[in-house]
Image (spheres, rainbow, N blue to C red):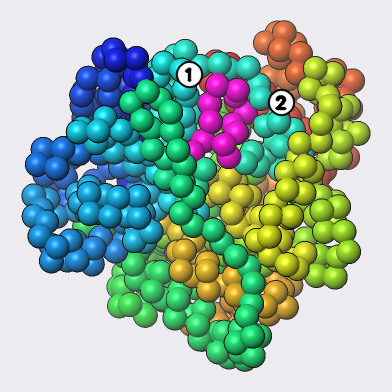
């Protein structure tokens, strides 16, 4: 797990090590162990390393294979690298290191663009092929590892974080109208390739991109998820599906144990993370480090779920760590949390993950986390109304979107009025043929888009801010493909994730299964009052915010006057949403 960056110049001139070193410096937390920079004429690669697999200097990056004429920078982990190494050795390849980075080089040389189809893992990498001058960028199937791009006709820069690109300079920081619309409609989800800034784009998940020396490029989308059931799937019993879920999840957890350092678990006390602990115990893990975080209550809303995480910790005899964040500390954490965001992310979970990661990093360098289970197994409350929907686009927008078009135009200045970008996006996705039923269309959209640019991005940003690698077994692509074949009715039982809950009964205590759905509660950011109201008011009424002129004054006044009256359908604060955007822009000098 690392931070990667680079510059590719298409004019025949030499690339800038200055820009790449500025990006590397911005990403120190992503890789505090070592760093490296490689210049090859019009290409510069930079790397910050967090040592997880092959701790020796032989695995340092940028990695150069002089014999094959290939350079690489890589962020992530290829869990099946040992099997691939064996296959490549049988094909005659020799290895000088024992980690997964060199396996990518050899796999690319052996199989070209098809190499990514063989990888089980999370990854973003850049490869420079010296003999052709081409540069390759690739990202894993479900977008677990980020890759941001800033380009013009003369050059391309890439990095693992958006702020790193800003550090290099020359970025158009005007707001992207479509991205702004998504942010304020879609719970801050901004689909790729967009970011909130016009001058920065994201390489979409499951994309293999080849840049020629002149800057032209071609994309291959090497994986597409389909949510469909064939006749055999429809005949399977619930018991068969339960066995298939457990078997696939066991494989996913086992793969993510691969490391040359200890592995822990982020234990929220929900069924997802509890199941990971139980399966790791099955694999013989002793003295497993588990971690939970909680906050003070506010507005009569409880701020922790320690009761349930304690049940799991005691049952499996883990080394459990409770992290409690008093309100006084929370206010101090917010600026650092927002600074760690590559893009503005509105979910309250961010500050919880930030502080949790800070504490976890004192004990381990790798953790497994339960993100993805709600999207893959149908855990959210907006799925059941879509089962019999006759207007899936309208029904999805009604239950998920934070505001309608009329309120959006009351929120932002007239310069951003016009198209309903978010509804158009949902319409295109639902009509693309990924699924037939309305509920499966929603599950597909959330798994391949919303999940990537909300929960997954949040976990990557907050863990890497503390040099911590997070692994997400529920996003093993083979598990996701299998779950896509399960009939929606089996997923939606028991208020969501029914089939997963029934499978979990074979592993974990029922008390954590038969409980109300939980989340990372941070009540103070939902019930904004006292010092939190002062905090957001200061940013929203600042000179910079007034000069930006993005948000309409009358709308802001109504939010600030009574924040508790302005709650989204997903039970979030509309005031926090607009405040977070302004704070993020100011934090990153935009």
Alpha carbon of mark 2 to alpha carbon of mark 1: how far? 20 Å
Label count reads 2
Label 2: few (<14), some or many (≥20) within 10 Å?
some
Q: In this figure, which residue is indicated by the disc labeled 2?
A: 177
Q: Quadrant of residue 98?
A: bottom left
- Quadrant of the rendering where the C terminus is positioned: top right
Residue 152: give its label.
Answer: 1
Q: Quadrant of residue 284?
A: bottom left
Q: SS of the residue at dot 2?
A: helix
Check residue 551 for magenta coloring.
no
- Residue 143, compared with residue 487, is above or below; it is above
Residue occupying the point 56% across, 49% down:
452
- Residue contact between numbered discs 2 and 1, judged by CB atoms under 8 Å: no
- Segment tinted magenta in the rendering: 192-203
Check residue 200 for magenta coloring.
yes
Residue occupying the point 36% across, 30% down:
212
Q: Is residue 277 left or right of residue 402?
A: left
The image position of residue 510, as x and y in percent, is 59, 82
Q: Is residue 118 left or right of residue 85?
A: right
The image position of residue 222, as x and y in percent, is 46, 54
Label 1: few (<14), some or many (≥20) within 10 Å?
few
Q: Quadrant of residue 46?
A: top left
Residue occupying the point 45% across, 59% down:
472
- Residue 29, compared with residue 177, is above or below; it is below
One can see residue 132 in this view: yes
- Residue 176, compared with residue 68, is above or below; it is above
Magenta part, dominant SS: loop
Q: Is residue 576 left or right of residue 259?
A: right
């Amino acid at each position: 797990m690392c931070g990667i960056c680079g510059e590719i110049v298409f004019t025949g001139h030499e690339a800038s090590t200055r820009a790449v070193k500025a990006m590397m410096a911005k990403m120190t937390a992503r890789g505090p162990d070592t760093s490296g920079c490689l210049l090859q004429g019009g290409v510069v690669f930079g790397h910050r390393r967090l040592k997880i697999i092959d701790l020796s200097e032989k695995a340092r990056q940028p990695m150069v294979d002089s014999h094959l004429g290939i350079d690489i920078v890589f962020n992530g982990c290829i869990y099946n690298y040992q099997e691939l190494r064996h296959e490549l050795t049988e094909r005659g390849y020799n290895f000088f290191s024992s980690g997964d980075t060199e396996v990518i080089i050899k796999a690319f040389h052996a199989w070209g663009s098809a190499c990514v189809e063989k990888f089980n893992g999370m990854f973003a990498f850049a490869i420079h092929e010296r003999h052709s001058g081409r540069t390759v960028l690739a990202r894993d199937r479900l977008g677990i590892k980020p890759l941001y791009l800033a380009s013009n006709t003369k050059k391309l820069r890439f990095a693992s974080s958006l702020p790193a690109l800003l550090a290099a300079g020359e970025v158009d920081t005007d707001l992207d109208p479509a991205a702004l619309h998504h942010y304020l409609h879609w719970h801050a989800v901004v689909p790729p390739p967009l970011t909130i800034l016009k001058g920065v784009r994201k390489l979409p998940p499951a994309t293999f991109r080849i840049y020629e020396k002149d800057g032209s490029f071609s994309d291959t989308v090497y994986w597409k998820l389909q949510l469909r059931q064939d006749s055999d799937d429809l005949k399977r019993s619930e018991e068969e599906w339960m066995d298939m879920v457990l078997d696939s999840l066991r494989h996913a957890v086992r793969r993510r144990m691969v490391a040359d350092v200890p592995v822990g678990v982020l234990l929220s006390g929900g069924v997802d993370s509890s199941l990971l602990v139980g399966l790791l115990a099955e694999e013989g893990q002793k003295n497993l480090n588990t971690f939970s975080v909680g906050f003070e209550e506010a507005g009569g809303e409880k701020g922790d779920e320690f009761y349930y995480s304690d049940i799991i910790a005691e049952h499996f005899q883990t080394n459990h760590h409770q992290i409690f964040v008093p309100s006084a500390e929370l206010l101090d954490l917010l600026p650092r949390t927002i600074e760690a965001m590559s893009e503005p992310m509105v979910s309250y979970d961010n500050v919880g993950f930030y502080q949790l990661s800070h504490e976890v990093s004192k004990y381990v360098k790798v953790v497994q986390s339960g993100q993805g289970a709600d999207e893959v197994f149908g855990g959210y409350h907006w799925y059941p109304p879509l089962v019999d929907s006759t207007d899936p686009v309208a029904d999805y927008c009604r239950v998920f979107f934070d505001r309608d078009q009329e309120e959006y135009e009351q929120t932002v200045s007239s310069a951003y009025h016009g198209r309903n970008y978010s509804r158009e996006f949902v319409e295109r996705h639902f009509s693309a043929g990924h699924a037939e039923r309305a509920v499966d269309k929603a599950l597909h959209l959330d798994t391949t888009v919303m999940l990537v640019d909300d929960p997954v991005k949040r976990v990557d940003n907050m863990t890497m801010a503390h040099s911590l690698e997070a692994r997400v077994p529920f996003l093993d692509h083979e598990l996701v493909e299998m779950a896509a074949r399960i009939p929606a009715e089996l997923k939606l039982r028991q208020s969501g994730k029914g089939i997963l809950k029934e499978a979990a009964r074979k592993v974990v205590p029922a008390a954590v299964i038969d409980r109300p759905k939980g989340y990372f509660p941070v009540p103070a950011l939902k019930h904004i009052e006292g010092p939190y109201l002062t905090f957001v008011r200061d940013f929203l009424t600042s000179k910079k915010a007034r000069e930006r002129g993005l948000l309409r004054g009358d709308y802001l006044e109504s939010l600030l006057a009574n924040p508790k009256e302005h709650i989204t359908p997903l039970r979030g604060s509309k005031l926090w949403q607009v405040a977070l955007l302004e704070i993020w822009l100011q934090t990153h000098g935009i």
